[in-house]
Amino acid sequence: MASFIASSTVRRFVSSSGFAGGVLVAAAGVVASISSPLSWLDDTNANNYSTKVSCQAAPSASPGTKSALDKSTLRTRMTCVGRFSLESETSTNPSIPTFFVALAGNKPFTAHSFAQLWKDRGMQDLHPRFHHVVSPTHVGYFEPNTEELDIQDALPPMIYRNDLKHRIQACLTHPLNVNDALWQVQISSGILGSSGAIPGNKVELLRQEFPYFKESILLFRGHHALADGVSLTAAFGDLCDEAQELRDAVHHEVKRRMGRNKTILQRLQLYLKRLVWFLHGSVQATLHHVYLLLFTPNNPFSELQDLLQTEINQTDGRTVSWCDAAPLNQVKQVAKSMGKSVTINDVMVSCVTYAVAKQLEFHKTRLQATHPDNAILKRVHNTINVVIPVHLGGGVLLPGQSVGNNLGAFCAQVPGEGTIGAEVRLQHVHESLHTVKNTPAPLLSYMLARVATSCFPISLKQWLFTSAITQSHACVAITNNRGSPRELHLDGQAIVSMAGFLPLPPSIPIGVSITSYNGEISLSVTAEPWAVPDSDLFLKWMLEEYARLEKITKAEEKTKGGRTYF
């Protein structure tokens, strides 16, 4: 870690009081020290990299009296999925979702700014789990964090995109000591556009209108035991200046969907419909998964792994990349032109499958030069399997709901060839996803995780988790995150860009995140370096497929003479 560029790191101390939600933010006596921008990942040397501020969380207990912070009464139970993620992760595949948020404003956003904002927004009351750690003595429980929250300043990334990539890679792969902290934030500020977090076109627009603006990058990582990635992103919204507006919008949408009050008979009919859907859908989902286990080809990347690892120097760590894909309205129009029920997610998943096919083609072409007689290189994969995590709460936190783990997942078979047309590929993807996502498959996976957490020992849980993913033959995980439709702000500074990065499950070498924010669709990829040595090229292939779909839509709109958003 020490090989990274030196930085001035300030650890801000935020302590829980041990009483009813009090928050103390230390703001004095902080002395900066020179360190690596990734020193926050090195728990063993933490004291060498920052100066902590003394802030007493609770009064000391007198001899013979009970401590004011009696952890035996303050422990809270972990969610089943959170505990399952903690106990099923491996040393090479830690379960740590990571994301960055890029701000633009007339002053730097610092660790002190974050700590003060955390206090002002009452985050400890809204989401108390952020002020907890995993109990080292009681399995499956959290206990209050009486030490500190890890919020640090660092020097800005110096080499365009590359430095930020290295930091993200380290966040995804370096284990997090959950007995000390469940999450960490690193904040850096510099010249607008210098890090590569903000796309070039946005940088140019901002420079024309606000030439004195600076950028600040908030790099966040948190263990899945704390919350799923969707919950973490939604909770981040409570820090924004528009937090109350976002909560009001969710409340209004909940009321709209609930509709008018139903009679007892109408409620009974609704419950019966849901019961029939669950029973019939469970049978359908089970048969579908059995079919995938028995009759689908192996993960094509697993077949090539040994050959690829001998050819590629870098076999550990991750390759990452991110970009803006297209305006949200444009993608909606593309989806609509391809079919009434085709969704934005269908369009983006189709682009992912094309990129996977191109990556496999790239590997096989290169390997055939050194292994011309290898039978594996001659196999044709007409289909591949993908895993799609699903947030059971619809991707939002309901009013009064705190962060948690509310994730399920389903597996689907999609085209694996790179030679079929873009429109045909999208139709196949839509049909496959539509069939599975209308079943309770995500809910069933969530329920199975609960059973496994409650009934099985850790070794068996790790085996079940790894076996379930391996036997599904999936080669890519794809998640989507629905952000705010309008621009948000932190302490008056505009959130210009954001990107999330999936922690890779064992045996799945590629993870893609699809995010919508402020009318824009953005993409990010996390991958094993032997599977995707150039993640920028992988995203380029995705954008090429989207460009073909966009071209088809334009031609259809021109033929029909209808309105277009292009």
Image (cartoon, rainbow, N blue to C red):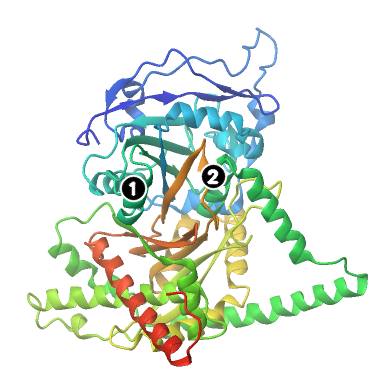
User: Is 361 placed left or right of 311 in the picture?
Assistant: right
Does residue 245 appear anywhere in the picture? yes
Q: How many marks?
A: 2
Q: Nearer the viewer, residue 303 or 204?
A: 204
Q: Nearer the viewer, mark 1 or mark 2?
A: 1
Q: In the rendered structure, which amino acid carries the disc numbered 1?
A: Gln
Count neighbours of disc 1 (C-alpha within 10 A) and say few if under 14, some if 14 to 19, many if 20 or more. Answer: few
Residue 208 shows which numbered tag? 1
Dot 1 falls on a residue whose secondary structure is helix
Where does residue 95 sit, x and y in percent of width and height? 43, 51
Name the residue nearer the viewer: 493 or 501: 493
**Residue 472 visible in the shown view:** no
Residue 107 image-quadrant placement:
top left
Q: Is residue 439 above or below residue 421?
A: above
Residue ID for mark 2: 236
Above or below, 236 against 546 in this view is: above
Image point 30% across, 75% down: which residue?
A: 544
